[in-house]
Image: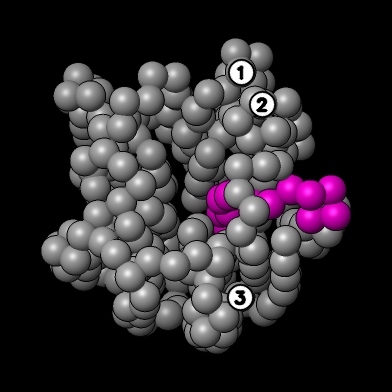
Amino acid sequence: MRATKKAGAVVAVLAGAVVPVLAPVADAQVSAVADVQVSAVADARVGAFVAYHGVTGAQQTAKFEQLRAQGYRPITVNVSDGERYAAVWVKGGSSSAWLMYQGMSASGYQKRFDAAVRDGFQPVSVSATGAGGSAVFAAVFEKKGGAFLARSGLTPAQFAAANRDAAGRGLALTSVDVYGAAGDLRYAAVWAANPGGTWYYTYGKTAAQHQAEFQSRVKAGYRPVRIAVGPDGTYTAVWRKDGLKSWAHYVGMSSSGYQRRFDALNAKGLYPVQVNAENGVYAAIWVK
């Protein structure tokens, strides 16, 4: 396994760079909310996992070095609130080479992106926080084939148009985060081959609207597979009908509230597959 880390500077915003790459094309949502300590748990599917949140850039770098040395790989990363990090790492589940970068400006992210793509990597988790020239990016790349699109700096209208374009190419929304300012939201997203099941996305939903969407989608057999909290407190989600029975989703959590949910669900054998935060509000998705 190859792993590389770079702690970079804070600076600009990637203005909607579109990067079509290699091969195929594909659609997804379920709900929940919270600050995390480090936890590891045995799991038959992934071997073990470690999850943390609310750590500084220096602490994130230390965790990177420690967990990489122990054979873990990151499956999701989130940066929020200046430069606080949350991530989930697992053992097992994939032997693909991977890369992880943090603390990047928009231009720094673009440079890392271009280099990674040239080496056969694709972004699997991209996160950003902050507005304008102070935006900070973090990302996880995995070495794999297949077509994909990756864009950032998108306005809500551009995000909707990009989803239509990607769906027309047979790609599904596989990573999304919302950053910028309350009056100027920006989206960073990745579309890749559909991992299975029909999908759907919603964006710009208030907590009440997201809850209503959640109830409607779950009745129709969907569950949330990606969730993002915007700087204005709205939610963006990806919903998928994939038949998975054991999962949990919470939004609107404080850091401590997230920790409580984490502890309770961990006791039931569920582990987080995504953690997202902005302005101290957490959202997360767990599976078994």
Q: Is residue 69 magenta?
A: yes
Residue 174 coordinates in the image, percent (x, y): 37, 53
Q: Helix or strand or loop: what does disc 2 sit on?
A: strand
Q: Could you say which is closer to the camera, residue 165 or residue 204?
A: 165
Q: Residue at x 50, y 65 (%)?
A: 144
Look at label 2 and name its amino acid.
Answer: Asp
The residue to which callout 1 is attached is 269
Q: Over which residues does the magenta segment extend?
A: 68-80
Is label 3 in a helix, a strand or a loop?
strand
Query: Can residue 189 be seen?
Result: no
| Residue 262, image quadrant | top right
Q: Earlier in the sequence, mark 1 or mark 3?
A: 3
Circle 2 packing at 10 Å, graded few (<14), some (14-19), many (20+), is: some
| x and y, in percent, of residue 45 in the image | 60, 30
User: Alpha carbon of mark 1 to alpha carbon of mark 3: how far?
Assistant: 35 Å
- Vertical relation: 182 (above or below) 254: below
Q: Which mark is residue 104?
A: 3
In this view, the residue farthest toward the top is: 268
Quadrant position of residue 148: bottom left
Quadrant of residue 196 in the image? Answer: top left
At label 3, which amino acid type do we have?
Answer: Met
Circles 1 and 2, Cβ within 8 Å, touching? The answer is yes
The reply to whether the magenta stretch includes residue 235 is no
Judging from the image, what secondary structure is the residue with disc 1 in? Answer: loop
From the viewer's perspective, is residue 50 above or below residue 94?
A: above
The x, y position of residue 273, in whole percent, is: 53, 39
Q: Residue at x 61, y 59 (%)?
A: 96
Q: Nearer the viewer, mark 1 or mark 2?
A: 2
Q: Amino acid at mark 1?
A: Gly
Which residue is the site of mark 2? 43
For marks 1 and 2, the one nearer the N-term is 2
